[in-house]
Amino acid sequence: MLASMDADELVEWEALYTVIEVLPEERADLRSGMTIANLLSPHLKTGAEPLKVSKFMPKFDDKPEPPSPGQSQEDMRKQWEAFVKD
């Protein structure tokens, strides 16, 4: 026996599909974080703080690299003098 889908259920599935398709593949980490947070939420102790999705996502920019010091004016002057001399 095949189960039939009523109009309300069809609308719900279409809405879910729309939400999932809005997130590009580059944000699979966000979808995974939401899934994990939702799966673990029922297992929290009563009164515990809800889980944050960001807790289950990688952090790409925790410690950004310091900017390079670049060239000092003295170094640039020496290079210019060496270039002009030749």
Image (tube, grey):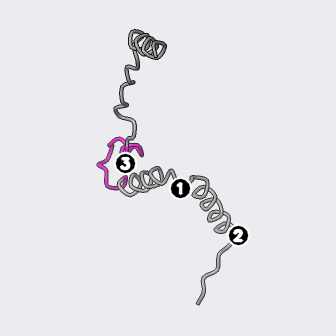
Query: From the viewer's perspective, is the residue at label 3 or at label 2 nearer?
Result: 3
Q: Which residues are magenta?
A: 41-58
Amino acid type indicated by mark 2: Ala
Q: Main secondary structure of the magenta part?
A: loop
Label annotation for residue 2 = none
Q: Provide the secondary structure element on which disc 3 rests.
A: helix
Disc 1 or 3, which lies upstream in sequence? 1
Picture coordinates of residue 11, whole percent (x, y): 68, 64
In the depicted structure, whether residue 54 falls above or below residue 20 = above
Residue that badge 2 annotates: 7
Tags 1 and 3 touching, CB below 8 Å: no
Does the magenta run of residues contain 56?
yes
Instruction: Count up the numbered dots.
Output: 3
Q: Residue furthest front?
A: 86
In the depicted structure, whether residue 76 falls above or below residue 10 = above
**What whole-number distance in Å separates the C-alpha atoms at marks 3 and 2?**
35 Å
Residue lying at 38% horizontally and 24% vertically, measured from the top left: 68
Label annotation for residue 25 = 1
Disc 3 or 2, which lies upstream in sequence? 2
Q: Quadrant of the N terminus?
A: bottom right
Picture coordinates of residue 60, whole percent (x, y): 39, 40
Does the magenta run of residues contain 15?
no
Q: Provide the secondary structure element on which disc 2 rests.
A: helix
Amino acid type indicated by mark 1: Glu
Residues 63 and 6: in front is 63
Residues 85 and 15: in front is 85
Residue that badge 3 annotates: 56
Q: Provide the secondary structure element on which disc 1 rests.
A: helix
Residues 80 and 13: in front is 80
